[in-house]
Image: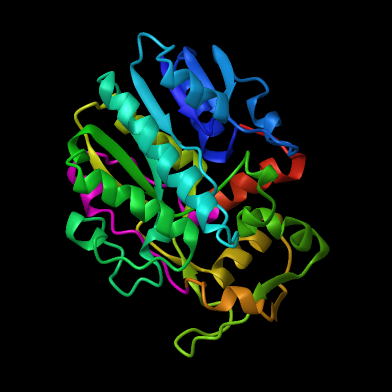
Amino acid sequence: MIILTGGAGFIGSCFLWKLNQQGIDDVIVVDHLGKSEKWRNLCGKRFSDYIQKDKFLELIDQDKFTNLECVIHIGACSSTTFADADYFIENNYQYSKKIALWAFKHKARFLYASSAATYGSGEFGYNDNVENMYRLKPLNMYGYSKSLFDLWILNNGYIDQVTGFKFFNVFGPNEYHKAEMMSVICKKFAELKSGCIKLFKSYNPQYNHGEQKRDFVYIKDVVDIMDYFFQHQDKTGIFNLGTGRAHTWNELALAMFAAIGKTPQIEYIEMPDYLKSKYQYFTEAKIDKLRAVGCNIEFQPFEIAVKDYLHYLEKHEYL
């Protein structure tokens, strides 16, 4: 039996799709659907049961599950602008600890989602070695909650019992419910169709407008790499999950226009004040550790991945 938290969310539901492709459906999905359209991510997927996230904690306290093989903990509040620090601590940190300890008790494998948000402004680089993780200074509470859990894993000697993924800028189908946390490709699709994409101005003299850079990684590549670690039980540790190559927002916009054969038109707009102090101007995963454990899965070329996603956006299709 596999437990998949966040299984109705973006990355979680796509990984469920990947499991289903391999004939795996003995999966219990744990999530909180609320009033969003997130439930649509589960349509057409095969799984043995669905449990609300709060009820799930009650059930593990009562030790109701047997034959547990693997816990894949993707569920979390991922908003970079939400301001309730207590909620992040309870939902992202304490909840994760409870599930991890339960998995360890049952000698089950534990795979979980960390985040590139832990790297903050990148002043210490984007190296996923253990020593660097102790120096990181996230820019928002989401990143801090993820960093706290990474450090809890390290400080308690659990690093050889887990596989953690520091996701960079993931984009692709099944993110439609994420509102302000959707990828820019998804957010800007309507603008693309209207002929002009609006990007934030730069307030850092090192970067011209639209030249801020991100490590964009396509969801299909993400789930392939997650599956590699799912299949290789001996590969443990905390790994960056990005392509290792950053692209600018301008390159992203140009790739979108090229995919639909339109002449590019880009407008630069003011960034909201609340975002300026929390904005990452550059992210780029260092993936040497990923390659060192034998994960040689190649990432799709940036322009091809963007074009593929636009096909899904055109029809609002899901994986």
Name the residue rendered at 57%, 78% in the picture. Answer: 276
Residue 242 appears in the figure: no
From this view, report whether residue 232 is shown above or below residue 182. Answer: above
Q: Where is residue 309 in the image (x, y as percent from the top left)?
A: 62, 46
Q: Position of residue 63 (x, y in %)?
A: 40, 14
From this view, report whether residue 257 is shown above or below residue 27. Answer: below
Residue 301 painted magenta = yes
Which residues make up the magenta segment? 281-303
From this view, report whether residue 173 is shown above or below residue 201. Answer: above
Name the residue rendered at 42%, 65% in the picture. Answer: 246
Q: How many marks?
A: 0
Q: Could you say which quadrant of the image residue 297 lies in?
A: top left
Q: Could you say which quadrant of the image residue 284 lies in?
A: bottom left
Name the residue rendered at 50%, 75% in the picture. Answer: 212
Q: Position of residue 124 (x, y in %)?
A: 28, 71
Comparing 245 with 104, the one in front is: 104
Dominant secondary-structure state across the stretch colored magenta? loop
